[in-house]
Amino acid sequence: MTYTEKKISYADYVRLRESVNWNNFFKEQTEKCLENTLYSIEVIDDNTIIGMGRLIGDGMYYMMVDIIVEPSYQGKGIGSNIVNKLIEYVHRETPVGGRSSIQLIAEKGKESFYEKLGFKFIPHEFCGSAMRKVIRK
């Protein structure tokens, strides 16, 4: 299994979202969002992308989005590795003496996965739980 820092293609993005039963967005909108991704990770097994994660943000505030692992590969630590690689990027980009904040909206029922990785739960009544992690240097 290989973890690659690479922009995710539209076709792989759509396929991975479909693999976990997430709705896709309008094609042109999706292509624009993928182009504007700050940092992304692809996970490749046997020449097939089986997982991904993206960061969007401005250098102080980051949002983790599209943390997806194909169902047949879940439970093997791949999702944790993706999240940790995204966190490592933020840590590298945060200057000494600086502080960065990472947020995400957890899929309902996945909150404990992110809590184990150091995120704090922020309850929200209308959607999945918001989670946050602060990086200090």
Image (cartoon, rainbow, N blue to C red):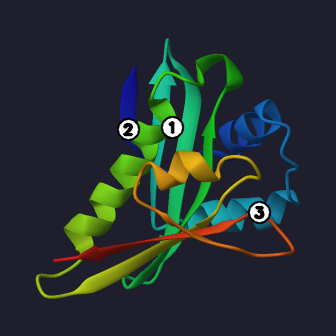
Would you name the residue on which mark 1 appears? 79
Q: Nearer the viewer, residue 3 or 113?
A: 113
Quarter of image, res 35? bottom right
Q: Nearer the viewer, mark 3 or mark 2?
A: 3
**Residue 119 position in % (x across, y down):** 47, 63
**Quadrant assignment, res 9:** top right
- The residue singled out by tag 3 in the image is 128
Answer above or below: position of 18 versus 89: above
Mark 1: few/some/many CA within 10 Å (<14, 14-19, 20+): many
Q: Any mark on residue 24, and which?
A: none
Q: CA distance from mark 1 to mark 3?
A: 18 Å
Q: Nearer the viewer, residue 46 or 95?
A: 95
Q: Residue at x 48, y 17 (%)?
A: 45
Instruction: Find numbered disc 1 in the image and state the secondary structure of the residue it sits on.
Output: helix
Q: Earlier in the sequence, mark 3 or mark 2?
A: 2
Q: Quadrant of residue 118?
A: bottom left
Specify which label sits upstream in the sequence, 1 or 3: 1
Q: Quadrant of the N terminus?
A: top left
| Crowding near the residue tagged with mark 2, few <14, some 14–19, many ≥20 C-alpha atoms within 10 Å | some
Whether tag 1 and tag 2 are in contact, CB under 8 A, the answer is no
Task: Give percent across and percent down for residue 18.
Answer: 82, 36
Amino acid type at circle 3 is Gly
Residue farthest to the left?
96
Please state which amino acid type lies under the numbered disc 1: Gly
> Mark 1–mark 3 contact, CB under 8 Å?
no
Q: Label 2, secondary structure: give it.
A: strand
